[in-house]
Amino acid sequence: MTATVTSDRPANVTLVKGAMQRWSDLEHAPGGGASAAARTYVEQQLRPDARVALVGPHPLDLITGLAGQVAHLTVFTRSIPDAVLIGNALLECEGTEVVCGSVAHLPEAPEPFDLVIALDDMARVLSLETEVLDWQEVFDAVRALLADGGTLLLGVENELGLHRIGSLRSRYTSNDDATWSATATFDTGRPRTEAALTGVLADAGLVVRRLGIGLPAWEDQAVIATGTRSFSPQMDTLLAAATLGSAAFRRVGADPTRVTRAAVLSGRLPDLASGWFVVAGAGSGAADEDVATITATTPSGEVVTYTERDGAILTERDGVAVAEPVEVPTGSRLLSEHVLDACAVHDLPALRSLLRRYAGWLAGRPTRTSAGDRVGDIRMDAVLVADDGLVALDPGVLRGSAEDAAWEGLADLVRVIRARGARHPWPSATDDRTMMSIMGAMAELAPHPDLEALVGTESREPALPAYDVPGLLAVIERLTETNTALASRAQWFEDRLNTREREMRLRTARHDEELKRVVRQQELLRSSAEDVRRSITYRAGNLLIGPVRKVRDRGGR
Amino acid sequence: MHHANHFYGHAQILARYCGLAEAPTIWGYLQHGWNTHDGFAVGHDFVPGRPKLVWSEAVARRGWALGLRDYVVIGSPWAYLLTVVPEAADSPREGTIVYPFHGWEGQQIVGDHAAYADQVREREGDVPLTMCLYWNDFEQPQIRRTYEEKGFRVITHGRRGHMYTGGDVDFLDHQLIELRRHRRVVSNRMGSALLYAASVGAEVGVYGDPMVLENDHAVLGGMARQERLLPQMHQDAVPAEVAAGVAARELGLDETLPPRMLAHALGWDDGVSSGEPVPQERRSTPATQELG
């Protein structure tokens, strides 16, 4: 009789106050810790015997991945649909549970956790089923989960991040379902600087052990760097290169106003990070050494980590140390930046020199001879220009011939030019194939037999830019120029056709006139001949000549 | 705009507060009961752009997350009634009034009334007990008799009405009178009545078989959701300050608007002095109906 109506949910899901009946966070955004770089950060904190709490929305595969690596995992989510999804995914995992509701309103305090992970900020931890809490109050509730001596791994979005500056839509004006939370924007108590964040942590009795920044976007932190204050110029160069060359940066925007590049050149990239990642310890203890590291997700999905120690930069790829330290020439910049600049200012000699240098550099690189050889990244976004040559950030062998590699690099460059709406020195109506041919010729490459296929393959890459209004406008302007040029060309052909048609009509008319004149002459001749036949002279002649012809004809027989 | 705006005489109360003799059309949708969903009945159709006039911020936030917009928090009609009908200085309180969870015209309640009556008597002891039934339960003699035979005074506050007809416009006035008479107000489920009671200083409690609605909507989350949301209210005797706090928040006691602003929110700018009343068949009972 007392069959109260509840949502079906797995046994490992507990609903508490604040559970949101019909709301899914994961439906709107994947949550914190989505990038491979961020996950590396998480894994560094895991201990097999640890009790771990994951607070707020995080990707499902991150959650299930954690479950097998720690002694206990409690996932805190405010959404019942998400809790059901996560609960079902964790059904077979021992030592896991899902608590759905408000972390600030748990009916009883859970056993403290050795590690609390909250990489999605506090905005989506707050439940709307309870009274509205500010950022600090939600943070306090998350902090309360931590055991003495435990570790908090916290992500906080930077409101002044590049991703917000270039965002298509303002959070202050958005009116969609996901923007009801005031803690994301309108909460004045929210930490908005690194100093404010460390102050909040200190007030909470937490010692910051590591402080990192995420770039280029909050939704996709492809690059995470720690110890940026102690970065050497070489590490600054690497951070800039990893950011500008990341697939996430390309997706975020073409950045034609070059805000990111301006931040790089002014040394302020860390100030404009999308957010901060903090590892903080509860209780007494000193901060870790401020290790300078960059963890970047490459376009191929590999995670590369650069660590600066004793003046040398050590590299790890997917956790495996690379024997040779990476060489970063002081003051070097990405080749793609140089090339795009040369294109923008129509400096064809400089462009020709750069492309020739690129092709020559590729010709000197080893090619793959066995399946075990590691293929490097030869895109211009992964090559630094130094005074005395080019340096690959991801050294390795070429997949095929140097010529093929150069064409691949050029195809990628064309794609970047198109995607960013970048200025280039060629006529507006120049198509991709023609542009590649020109640049191939500038690089002194032999003509490619099938540029169409190469361009076609590249054009299947994700369309860019996505959220960059200046970028979109630039693309529109370039396309407008192209369309204007094509329209002019079409008009020229039409004019030519009209001229030709007029000429043909004129010639036809002349021909007709000539024909008529000849016909008239023929008529005149015919008429003249008739007149002659009808004349007395002609007929008299016929009378005289006729008998003579007959006599002649008989004599002849 | 919608006939639910006139349930329980809500529109009339708002009109009285605004100084009108009759309630003009409310140009919006008025929340008509305490609600853990978006403020309205499941499947309610809205005309886009028309305001959703709700009691509390929580309802507005929840509705936003569900994709609804145009919420305006005005507080509950009950909050306005409290200002229209102030409490007498020396009103004695005695006994307990019981508001069992009720069904409505479209969904009947499933439960054992006799067992519930025994439970209430056992908990409340030898005090005057009043059982207030919703009209569709009240009009079933066997239910009335069940409680009467166990010493309850059985009453109803009237009908909420349907399609602008048959509603008791002084429904809440009757309820206010009764709530101010009793020392305790109890129910087997959280509901508007308990919040009303807490707002007028009566001790409140929730216990007993919660009963269920036939074909209750899963989206509402049932009794379990109420218990999660307000665990502090699910006890025999809720501490006064706790109950008062919950009532203030859920009824929007601090959200009420001055008459001019309320009239504006309801679309009565022109109606405060000369508004056209909504044609409806009024029912106004002189006092709470009791089993005769």
Image (cartoon, rainbow, N blue to C red):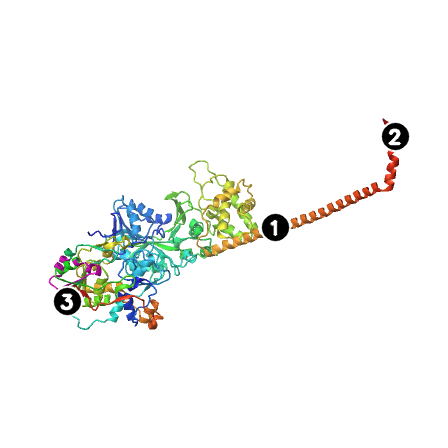
Q: Using the rendered view, name the quadrant where residue B50 is placed.
A: bottom left
**Crowd band around label 2 with a 10 angstrom C-alpha radius: few (<14), some (14–19), many (20+):** few
- Label 3 marks a residue whose chain is B
Q: CA distance from mark 1 to mark 2?
A: 74 Å
- Label 2 marks a residue whose chain is A
Q: Is residue B135 magenta?
A: yes
Q: Is residue B160 left or right of residue A528?
A: left
Q: CA distance from mark 3 to mark 1?
A: 99 Å
Is residue A550 positioned above or below B84 on the image?
Answer: above
The answer to whether residue A285 is seen in the rendering is no
Q: Is residue B161 left or right of residue A39?
A: left
Q: Is residue B194 left or right of residue B46?
A: left
Same chain shared by disc 1 and disc 2: yes
**Which residue lies under the disc numbered 1?**
A494
Q: Amino acid at mark 1?
A: Glu
**Which residue lies under the disc numbered 3?**
B94
- Residue at 37% over, 62% down: B49
Mark nearest the camera among 3 and 2 is 2
Dot 1 falls on a residue whose secondary structure is helix
**Number of on-image labels:** 3
Q: Amino acid at mark 2?
A: Val
